[in-house]
Amino acid sequence: MHRNVPPIVLVLVVGAWLVVQSWGLTAPQAGPTLPGMRSTIDAAEFPSLQAALDALPSAGGLVRLPSGTFEIHQPLLIHQADVCLEGAGTATHIKNVNRDGQPAIVIAHSEHKRSGNDRDCELWRLRLANFRVTGNEDSGHGIEAHNINEIFIDGVSVSHHGADGIRLIYCYEDPRITDSLITYNGGVGLNLIGCHDIVVSSNQFEENQDALRCVDGFNLCMTGNCLDDHLRDGVVIENTYGSVVAGNMIEECAGAALILDRDCYGNTLSANVIAHNGAGIDLRDAHGCAVSANTLTIMKTNAIRVGPESSRIAISGNNFSSSYIGQGEIKRQAGDQSTAGLVISGATDLLATGNMFAGVDVPAIEAKTEQPSVIANNFLIETDADIPMVRIERPTFDRNHQSTTKR
């Protein structure tokens, strides 16, 4: 015993040590202690982003991207399942400077041939989150994924690519694209090819060619998105069934706001605001679909059109409106007041009832239908007495109310 240490101090130290041992409060050991844990890969510790991705084990893992601008000349390749690539928001900027039509990010099995539906080379559970990826007019797609099941893209800004912003090819099971900004791409903002049970929610699309295309797919649920200023069409759905497009704002598309074509069936288009587009809802080849509770304002032509290849369409509760704001006032200036109506071009087995047409400056309902069809109980107000507001050939039933009174 050291002569300068009082006995009571030693007693206290020994007692404390015994308590620590009995409670198991020993110091943590170095290295991973949680069973099954994989270490997070910090891309800042690698010479390139691709080197960080290549460090992933075959079982996948998390790659964190630091803030900064990272120029790439070749696509970033992800070949593993169960991978999360996450940045620091838009402060993480992946900039594709390639001018040979190459994409920025490619996600595919290492043996995938990058053509067609290769179900033998699928990957599962990939997530891209919280970063910005840009290209140039000569680059390829922003994000390109092949046969990835349960792909999840959220909080990603995808812009200025020479081709599509996001292109998902046969990402069959449960793709989700949410809370992302998809803008100024030379092709389609979000191009979905052969996908199934798709969720597209709370995204913003601006000034792509088309905002979204869903081709040869199933069960698209597109809700709560904002689409603006597209150079071609807004939403194009082809050969896809069992889908809902609801609660979206679609404005200022040069072409149509929403198109159904190539044997679409069993889809619902509801509660969308469709404003100031070149055309509105165009049912080119659609069957067994419902179009309800949409607001179609200051449409240049054909607010809703049903083509001759369509049948069994129910159109109800929609509002076809001008820019009237009450007390006899119109918001839009002369030359920007066009308000189109409903055009039915030879469709069969059609129901159009309970719609409001207000301030329409062309025939509100212009229909050529085959038996049996019902066009009834629609309300027309503030119409031009010199324009025949209803032109219907061969409806089963026609009982519409028309008012020519100005308010």
Image: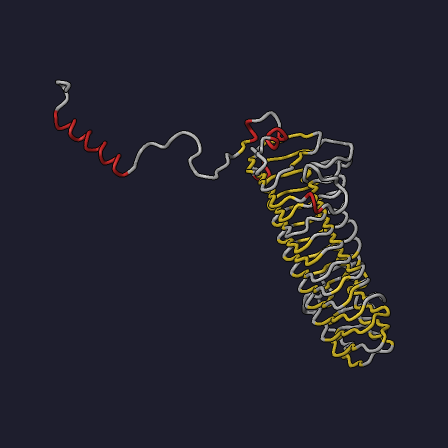
Tell me where residue 237 sits by quadrant: bottom right
* 223 relative to 147, above or below: below
**Coordinates of residue 375 in the picture (x, y in percent):** 78, 76
Could you say which is closer to the camera, residue 77 or residue 191?
A: 77
Residue 182 spot, x, y in % from top left: 68, 46
Q: In this view of the protein, can residue 377 be seen by the observer?
A: yes
Where is residue 334? Give x, y as percent. 79, 60
Q: Is residue 352 above or below residue 38?
A: below
The answer to whether residue 334 is seen in the rendering is: no
Query: At x 52% / y 35%, what residue is drawn?
Result: 40
Residue at (14, 20) in percent of width and height = 1
Residue at the spot x=71%, y=64% of the render? Answer: 267
Farthest residue to the front: give it: 120
Q: Say left or right for 399 vs 157.
A: right
| Residue 401, quarter of the rendered image | bottom right
Q: Is residue 265 left or right of residue 24?
A: right
